[in-house]
Amino acid sequence: MNAAGAGSGDRAGWDRVPAGGNFLVIPALLAVFLWCFPGSLSAQQSDTLGGVDRNALNAREEFRLGVQAYNRYAFNEGILSFERALAFRPGEGLILDWLGRAYFRSGLEDTALRQWQAAAEAYGPSSGDGLLVTGRIETIRNRRSLFPVMDEDIRYVEAGRYPGTSDNTVLYRQPTSILALEDGSAWVVAYGSNELVRIDVNGMIRQRRRGPLNGFDRPYDLVRGLDGRLYLSEFRGGRVSVLSADGEWLSYIGSKGLGDGQLIGPQNLAVDEEGYLYVVDYGNRRISKFDPDGKFILSFGDRRSGFQGLLSPTGIAAGGGRIFIADGVSRRIFVFDQNGIYRGVLVEEGLSGPESLRFLSERQLLAADTNRLLLIDIDSAVVRELGVLGNSRVRIVGADLDRNGNILAANFQAGEVALMTPLNEMAAGLFVQIDRVVSDNFPEVTVEVQVQNRRRRPVVGLNAGNFLLSEEGRAVSEQNFIGGAYRAESSDVVILMERSLETASRREDLAAAIRDIQAGGSRVVSLVSAGEQPLRERLEGGSTAVFAAAARGNPASYTPRWRFDRGLRLAATDLLPESKKRAVVFVGGGALGELAFEQYSLSELAAYLTNNGIRFYTVLVEDNPPAEELRYLCEQTGGQVLPLYRPEGIKPVLENLGSAPSGSYTLRYRSQLPTDFGRAYLSVEAEVYLLERSGRDKIGYFPPLE
């Protein structure tokens, strides 16, 4: 920030005044305050002693307390301090900015937007700080729900390329398939150079795999099995290689030939919900099915009653008990069941040369069709064009949606991978938010930065080269990238137990839910009983018996006046200082009662969770359908509704919490700013760059008092 507008001047004014005790009047002190806080004060607002503006002194002290409270996650305490600071310095831009931050993290988004709007006006709409706040306002207003798979109106445009050559150096040749990974990177199958290359979000090659001693023989497609192993088809080798999750070669499936379990020119692959592998046996014009260990099961797709036979099978996808197969000659997509029985045509016209198929959700397929990317609804058979590559040399052979919501398209003919991004994302850039500054070991300063796209999806896979920290316009000294939370495999949960009269008779089911949640692998931070007055149950010792007793609760705590809102607020607050992969798991019957949102509204609770990176899961101990409010919270935060006694159990879903995406990054640097014995307000700015997109945020902190 600069000193041009009201509230500007990061280190002027209040940062030069002693925090307490007797004040030594310095002649220039009042001028410093007026420089920081221009504008006259009324008689009611102004209270001076010996030429020192006591309102400015009080505002500075309350502001300091508010900043410190914010950085230890005490957002309500910070709000009170910032409100008191504003009482002493009404209309101060910097205080309004921080007050908006505290309201935002508390889930009160409308109130936060009002404070930020006032801050932008105080800063001056054309000032750097005013523009920064205005951009934040626009982003928050326009953001939609968390993790949408594919909005109906999205249009993808080319945002960059990962070329196969650089300065006459061949990096890889003729990509045919993409497999997106959890860390934002992706495996690229390089048919022409007989290898797999792993490319990170910045387009850098981080890993190569070339197979066993005899190498891969024209690798074509790559898919992941349910156990994490990878399957790689080898077109010329007439086989499928089984790889470890890291790409190390393990074994072969199939061999070249015409018989059962043999392959000629295997191309695209798919794995169904039970782990069975389906191979497009292009040369034999059929589909071969294998069990996860490579045992041949059956083949299908030949001419038989009611079906003309596959002429040129290309893409394949398996899901919902159905197998979808694209045919390049007939330009159709056919449907079979898992036993290879023909079920009809999904798409009969409008395709030019369909190749790969990938599931994006339970009902949506991503299809590569010559130079186009298509979205196909498997229920309605509606085909919508997502984007087009306009290069003169285009043949998209494979495509996948990466962890950051982009589509990576393998352009076989051009020998490169195209990065395609939603059009509105290209214009909007990144949403960057400094969540926290820790200065306990000053001059060493730790900064936690949250990076999201404009649709609330965490941006994963960033590294040191994507970040630039600066102090007062100068790059910081000794900037170190500590890491990204997306790499962490650990996760934390708080369990919220319903204490309604209806669940009083299901106490053993509550205890059973606890056992299943613990089996999911996350650390249980606390267990909150949502009674009339929510409370944390005692978990000392951590034994199975202790947890079961806490889940059952005190019979007296079950009441018709149980409070979901207060319980959820307490549960979420317990998670704030914990790991960045975290969730509240609510266990109940599905109904919420009349007092569910007496104190906190549904939208406020949803915002409190999403703005602090907390997912929400509902575990149902009864067969009743869940309240729509519970579904809403799950959808908004990326959680899920889970019946306790569903066939597969709740453990598999909760185990995946450790692999959930997180856009939180930690950096550390050595400050060069003077502290005025810990009284100075020091600013830090974070800029994030990713290919052609960027975003930034600016915040400040107080070092420890000396």
Image: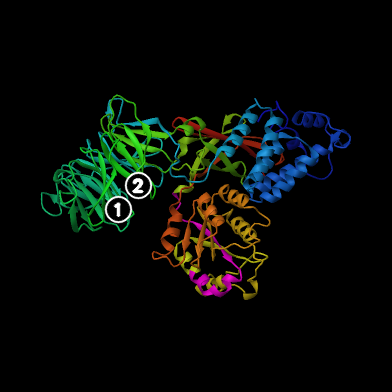
Q: Is residue 618 above or below residue 349?
A: below
Regarding mark 2 in the picture, which secondary structure is present there?
Answer: loop
Q: Quadrant of residue 13?
A: top right
Amino acid on which disc 1 is placed: Arg
Between 644 and 490, the residue placed more toward the observer is 644
Q: Residues within 10 Å of mark 1 (few under 14, many from 20)?
A: some
Res 587 seen here: yes
**Label 2 neighbourhood size at 10 Å, few (<14), some (14-19), many (20+)?**
some
Is residue 151 rendered to the left or right of residue 238?
right
Q: Position of residue 353 (x, y in %)?
A: 25, 35
> Residue 140 in magenta?
no
Q: Residue at x 57, y 66 (%)?
A: 497
Quarter of the image where the C terminus is located: top right
Of mark 1 and mark 2, the one earlier in the sequence is: 1
Q: x and y percent of residue 169 in the render?
A: 28, 28
Residues in magenta?
A: 487-512
The numbered mark at residue 378 is: 2
357 in relation to 557, above or below:
above
> Which residue type does callout 2 highlight?
Ile
What residue occupies the far front of the structure in this picture? 306
Task: Residue 174 in the image: state x and y as whole percent.
Answer: 25, 34
Query: Distance between the Cα atoms at labels 1 and 2?
Result: 10 Å
The kind of secondary structure element at disc 1 is strand
Please state if 543 lies on the left or on the right of 108 as rendered.
left
Question: Mark 1 and 2 residues: CB-CB less than 8 Å, in contact?
Answer: yes
Image quadrant where residue 175 sits: top left
Which numbered dot is residue 322?
1
Q: Which of the labelled discs sits on residue 76, or is there none?
A: none
